Image (tube, helix red, strand yellow):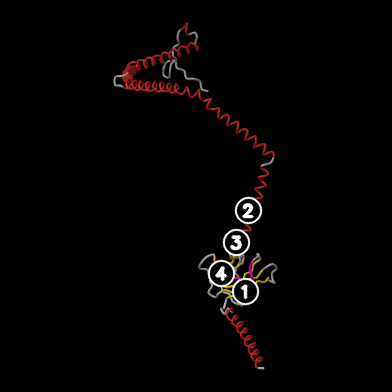
Amino acid sequence: MENRSHALMTGFFTIALVLAAILAGFWFNHDSTKRVPYVIATTQSIPGLNPQATVRYRGLEVGKVDTIDFNPRKSGEILISLLLDPDTPVTTSTYASLGYQGVTGIAYIQLDDERTGSPLLKSDKDRVAAIPLRPGFLDQLEKRGKAILELAESFSRRANEALGPENQAALKSTLKNMSEASERIAQIPDELEPAIKQLPELTRNANRAAASVAKAADDYDKLAVTLNSPEGPIARLTTTVDKVSGSVEGIAANIELQTLPHIVSMADEAKTSLRAVKRTVNTISDRPQSLLFGSPSAPPGPGEPGFAPPPAK
């Protein structure tokens, strides 16, 4: 009986020790920190993210993922509940993205902020604030990979079009023309060799022509000096012209002072003679008999003997 009692006591002690170990484990693993709830609503895929995953703010651990569920009110939307430390600086410009740890592929939530100084985003159990989820590195790589594949496909298609039969023929023709052009370019030195040999003679001719031009310029300078000298031809011609101009002016003055009065007097006498001739012609025209009997005497005027007044009209 005593052995049985010892065995029973040992069993109770063992059970009590196991229960104490379990309770101690729960106690030590229990997080008594009061955390602030936040939620992420997204339609993106979240591979590798599980409940209890770590939440980091710019690399620092600030909380964990509480639950991951579908939104019953919106089809296809995933709700990720977060529990963050109360001193985490979550603001209105804070956003979340998926990060991955090393080669294990375990995902975690990475929080970051677009700018500093934004107001804090308040949240509690009654009104849980939402944090937007942006595409992570793998999502961006996937999108860019698709774009790169599309560009590669487009490039391959255009390359196939560029290497078509018609373009190949055109390329061959171009290469042939380039080959012919290179051959012609190679012949240019041979064709230019005679002209190059004549360059010294052309240079000598050019030098002689330049010397002739320089001599002509010197002769022109000497001629200009001779013509512009005080006793040169231009000066003598100017003096002669001045003398002739003075003689002409003297002749004009002499004509004006001596000859013009005589001409005016002769013109007056000619006018008087012409008037007399005109009167004579008029008299002969009116009385032709005056050529035989002479001019009639003038009729008596008033107060003279024989005056008769004209009859009244």
- Going from N to C along the chain, the mark reached first, 4 or 3, is 4
Quarter holding residue 10: bottom right
Q: Residue 212 appears at what percent x and percent y?
A: 39, 20
Front-most of residues 74 and 241: 74
Q: Type of residue at label 3?
A: Phe
> Is residue 257 visible from the viewing direction of this image?
no
Q: Give the answer, above or below, for where 294 lies relative to 134.
A: above
Magenta range? 48-62
Dot 1, crowdedness within 10 Å: few (<14), some or many (≥20)? some
Q: Which residue is mark 2?
A: 148
Q: Residue 240 appears at what percent x and percent y?
A: 32, 17
Give the CA separation, mark 4 to mark 1. 14 Å
Front-most of residues 282 and 183: 183
Determine if the magenta segment contains residue 308: no
Return the mark for residue 85. none
- Relative to residue 292, is residue 230 drawn left or right? left
Mark 4–mark 2 contact, CB under 8 Å? no
Q: Give the answer, above or below, for where 193 lies relative to 276.
A: below
Q: Which residue is mark 3?
A: 137
Give the CA separation, mark 2 to mark 3. 16 Å
Which residue shows up at 52% across the image and 27% down it?
A: 189
Q: Residue 243 appears at what percent x and percent y?
A: 31, 18
Q: Which residue is mark 4?
A: 56
Dot 4, crowdedness within 10 Å: few (<14), some or many (≥20)? many
Q: Type of residue at label 2?
A: Ile
Give the CA separation, mark 4 to mark 2. 31 Å
- Relative to residue 138, is residue 227 drawn left or right? left
- Going from N to C along the chain, the mark reached first, 1 or 3, is 1
Which residue shows up at 61% across the image and 58% down it?
A: 141
